[in-house]
Amino acid sequence: MPPRSSLTVAPSRVASPVVGVLAYDGVNAFEFGIAVEVFGLRNMGANWYRVVVCADQPKHPLLLGFGVKLLTDAGLACLEEASTIIVPGWHDIDAVPPEPLLETLRHAHARGVRIASICSGVFVLAAAGLLDGRRAAVHWAQADALARRYPNLLVDPRVLYVDDGDILSSAGRAAGLDLCVHIVRRDYGAAVANEVARRLVIPAHREGGQAQFISVPVRDEGDPLADVLAWARMHLDEDMTIDTLADKTGMSRRTFIRHFERATGVSPGEWVLQERITQARQLLEDTAMPIEDVATACGFGSADTLRHHFRVRFGTSPGRYRASLLHDPQPQRLARQPLRAA
């Protein structure tokens, strides 16, 4: 049994939100497991999510691969009680999902349910018509197929995930973890999301706009880039120029930029901006610090600059972001605008 969490969701009169995890023949076991594990964590408090596994063929053994089978009594009707639906990887991107499944998702979306796909689960959302005119994330290897089949989609093969408010999508496999932790952060705030990440032994948060594919990942302590990233996170309130960062690695400006982009998937300026926004969100969620002071502490210089970046990234202001956390006792539906890619 996992150890009792050091940080739990505070009790309230609001019923636990229900997360419906879809299952079907050939569902990806890893992606299915991600959703069940994140939203079904124990010892997270009385108002933590309640997970229901809903199959398009209830009481029928579903093959997960490698001889593993899944049996559940709940059918698609149980999604009626869900406020969030997770659609794990579809078994075959060339196979059209059954109409009862698609109609269930359309009906859920029409009544305001939040729906999120992991990896090839995006093909199910697209087949249901839920992504027309929207930006969607997908595994880079499936991007061309998705774009050809559904030309009304704005396919983005670069990013880890896209949050479009009531519809979310993620890239391949492990990006589903990032998306699920992002949903936790949206609902319960940074402190609880960080606790979930600690329980799962994964990085606390990765913005959706980070690149899927990184050719030369940052290594451990002692790597010049790893050291400068750690230093930068501790000094976000300071003037952070490319030359300053390059000097700390002993590289020329041009060499530093090249190595940095290969290692992180984004430019130095975009990385610093993402880190500053992440820190600002945490201060807004966890402290009563005035917005002007938050802006200064995170290196934005002024509240106006912070407001500008919040509107671009999240479609709201820092003040409204904080107010929605303070006044709504239910899980939040923040960041209605998609997270912008670098």
Image (cartoon, rainbow, N blue to C red):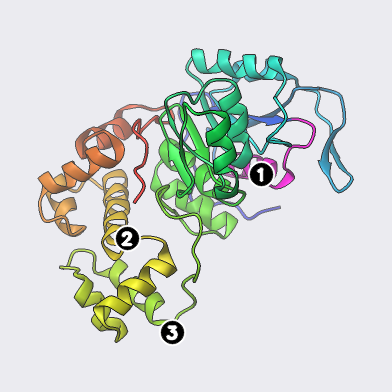
Q: Residue furthest bottom?
A: 250
- Let me know if residue 116 is in the magenta part: no
Residue 319 in the image: state x and y as whole percent: 20, 36
SS for tag 1? helix
Vertical side of 148 occupied by 295: above or below: below
CB contact under 8 Å: marks 1 and 2: no
Residue 253 in the image: state x and y as whole percent: 25, 78
Disc 3 residue type (three-letter): Gly
Residue at x-position 30% and y-position 84%:
251
**Nearest to the observer: residue 116 or residue 172:** 172
Residue marked by disc 1: 31
Q: Is residue 48 visible?
A: no
Residue at x-position 43% and y-position 82%:
223
Residue at x-position 31% and y-position 83%:
249
Disc 1 residue type (three-letter): Glu
The region drawn magenta spans: 24-43
**Sooner in the amino-acid sequence: mark 1 or mark 2:** 1
